[in-house]
Amino acid sequence: MSETPDHKNSCQTYAMTKNKNNITGLEGAQIMFFGNLEVDRLTVQALTAVMLTVIIGVISTLLIFKNNTRIPDDIYADSSDLLMVSTGEEMIGLLKENDLWEIDKVGAVSPLLFASYPANIEAFATSVKKRVFFHGLLPVALTALNEIREERRLLRAILAKLPKGNPQLTFSDDYGAWGRVLTMDEIEFVMMLTRKYRTNLATEMVKRIDLVPLSMIMAQGAIESSWATSRFANEGNNLFGIWTWSGKGLVPRDRDDGKGHKVAMYDSILDSIRAYILTLNRLPAYRRFREIRKHTMNPLKLADGLLNYSERRDIYVWEVKNFIQYNNLRQYDKCFLVDKPIQYKDIKVLKFTMREGIKAV
């Protein structure tokens, strides 16, 4: 079927209009064709810009989340993991059943966490009492150290995401100052650390969140608590003689008139170890200890940083060093915690509440 003259003229007129629109440039709208679809060029450019912006945003978001530091919910041991024993004999039995009475050369330690020491260990022979104290403390101390190790690992991962070259990097409680580099979980974790370690300077925080040798923990715990037989150990799970001026505590019988300090009370020996490590890690009195630790983890050298721990100062430092050597405690510095089944038998698991203290369930 042939086209009518009117139809031809119409097509020619349309074609001329198209050419004119394409030629006129700024004088008229620029038209682009996708098959039979007629589209304004400016619209195409705008849509293209929007699509590129979305793509770049998606890629950036993926890269940011790829580098996110996941903050685990179980950094710190739960009180439900703690075990309560009523007698020293019961404690010894559990130590033997869980390969903790004899520590092998590899240094693998079962995660058997005692809540406290039984009062009757004072009646044991000295050699037995020592082993009960050291080997009962060992997995609990390793648990506390693992918490510090995890804090340090997470902090370093977060610092790796921040701009380099700022030695005076400070952490602000103004969340708007953080930009978009970190997630809210990461920011809140860092701010928790600033409160815990009492510094918002990054370099100082790295210095404070660090380990204490097991041999030092064992030595000072034994010295300060008389092998967990002291009143403060029995009544308050305080193995390290930590004082407090607020909160719950025990008044020393020989406290001078006018003094207001108390010996702190803890729900468990795990909390006591945590408080001891935190004391060394954040108080100004142990700045020298932290400076020495930057260069060595040798407990005999680190002990020089304990001058302010006791009024006996140099004599106390000598006592700690001598105690570590005499009891061969450096052998424990190689120990590490393993995750393997524990024979709980009928040992009751502890639950803690702020108001009621310790409850066996």
Image (cartoon, rainbow, N blue to C red):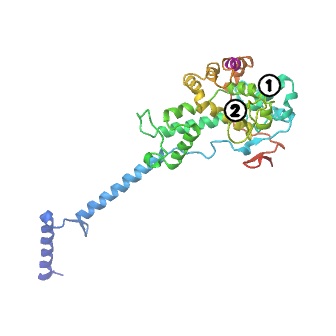
Residue where numbered disc 2 is placed: 242
Q: Tell me the quarter of the picture where residue 134 sits.
A: top right
Residue 121 x/y as whole percent: 85, 30
Classify residue 360 as left or right of residue 328.
Answer: right
Disc 2 versus disc 1: distance between alpha carbons?
Answer: 22 Å
Mark 2 or mark 1: whose residue is earlier in sequence? 1
Q: Is residue 105 magenta?
A: no
User: From what the image shows, is residue 190 above or below residue 135?
Assistant: below
Q: Could you classify mark 1 by the number of other residues whose Cα lies within 10 Å: few (under 14), some (14-19), or many (20 or more)?
A: some
The answer to whether residue 76 is visible is yes
**Which residue is at the front of the view, 238 or 341?**
238
Residue 316 within the segment the image draws in magenta:
yes
Give the label on residue 130, or none.
1
Mark 2 in CB contact with mark 1 (< 8 angstroms) = no
Given the image, on which type of amino acid does mark 2 rest? Ile
Q: Is residue 236 left or right of residue 36?
A: right
Check disc 2 and report its element: helix, strand or loop: loop
Residue segment shown in magenta:
315-321
Image x and y of residue 83, in percent: 78, 41
Q: Residues within 10 Å of mark 2 (few under 14, many from 20)?
A: some
Q: Is residue 320 left or right of residue 65?
A: right
Quadrant (top left, top right, bottom left, bottom right) of the N terminus = bottom left
